[in-house]
Image (cartoon, rainbow, N blue to C red):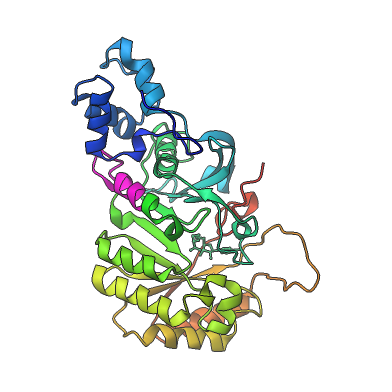
Amino acid sequence: MRAPRRGKPPEHWSDLDAATRRQRVVEAGLPAFRAQQLSRHWYERLDDDPTGWTDLPASVREAVASQFFPRLLHPVRTLGCDDGATVKSLWRLHDGALVESVLMRYGVGRPGTRSTICISSQAGCGMACPFCATGQGGLQRNMSTAEIVEQVVAGARTLARGEAAGGPGRISNVVFMGMGEPMANYASVMQAIRTITAPEPDGLGISARGVTLSTVGLVPRIQQLTEEGIPLTLAVSLHAPDDELRDTLVPINTRHKVDEVVDAAWEYARVSRRRVSIEYALIKDINDQAWRADRLATVLKRRGDWGWVHVNLIPLNPIKREPKVNEVVYTRSREEDMAEFVRRLQARGISTTMRDTRGNDIDAACGQLAAEE
Ligand code: SAH
């Protein structure tokens, strides 16, 4: 048995690639073929109780459970809204850190129901965007690969057991839009994506095209992602077309400027042939002026007009925060300003949609995840 990693979460099956899993199984004195058996139970049958895995010798089940499948995510609370179609889970990690994930079902009661899970990649976030609840608490730590993967496994299990509104189902989409900046935890996030997209039984078998990674725009990491050649969807949280404003809304902009970020996103689209999504939260009288819509269109169209980009506008979700003296107050744009913003982008031929505000009343919507008990 291996010594626990001090300070780090215990090693878990979901931290390992298929070759390492075989190695660990052999180190534990079991034949290598057991590795696939274990993966089949975990990712295909979504069964989280190794003591009931009857195709394993009874004498090793306990050891397999504690060595390979230690519980990483301890459920603290789940909250539902939208008639059960949105479920937010609060998890406690081994060291007490708290994170959240949100499961959303679309088209319940109709054929072709889809399910998206929004997951966290860090406990807290160090990017300090002033309008985002997660950004207010600072960064606690990076999550491990398995802590990331297990959020998806937990969601898949909830769906498979028919515990979510709309009956049994499968995860169709995974979005890294929960807590944290995924590009700041690059290696663990990439390894997690490999397991999430690995065909069963080695992973969850979710299509890479169904995975969206959202970033504030860490340019070197976007470039690295471009080289990986994994056909993910890249989303970039732009929120302003000009550096002067973006410096205040997305502080990392003081290091990676709008033009650099948009260039890196464009290059990702060019190489991957995947359309990039630009995220833009509409904030009243801050970034929602008609001239800024025009400016955004210009910034995006400078890179050519071949449909490389899609703009996803998000009506700003309210966050709980202590009011401070002289602080700018961020609130949702007026309906007419949002409509004009959409109209201007569409008039310039830019594919644009307005995101729904799922989970608003349980603080589960974009930017509201604070993981408070
Ligand atoms: N750190 C990454 C991943 C988080 S994704 C990123 O920023 O892209 C969460 C998305 O919700 C981001 O696009 C973020 O800018 C947006 N967001 C944050 N606070 C929000 C709020 N109060 N209302 C609406 N969207 C918000």
Q: Residue at x 66, y 62 (%)?
A: 318
Instruction: Assign the N terminus to one quadrant of the image.
Output: top left
Identify the image quadrant of residue 89: top right
Q: Residue at x 48, y 67 (%)?
A: 216
Q: Which residues are magenta?
A: 190-205
Instruction: Assign the C terminus to one quadrant of the image.
Output: top right
Q: Considering only vertical position in the picture, is 39 above or below 173?
A: above
Residue furthest right in the image: 325
Across and down, in percent, residue 39 comes to 28, 31
Q: Considering only vertical position in the picture, is 78 above or below 130?
A: above
Across and down, in percent, residue 112 comes to 34, 49
Q: Nearer the viewer, residue 170 or 366?
A: 366
Q: Considering only vertical position in the picture, is 346 above or below 118?
A: below
Q: Residue at x 36, y 28 (%)?
A: 68
Q: Considering only vertical position in the picture, is 84 above or below 213?
A: above
Across and down, in percent, residue 245 comes to 59, 81
Regarding residue 297, the answer to whether it shows in the image is yes
Q: Residue at x 27, y 12 (%)?
A: 57
Across and down, in percent, residue 101 comes to 51, 46
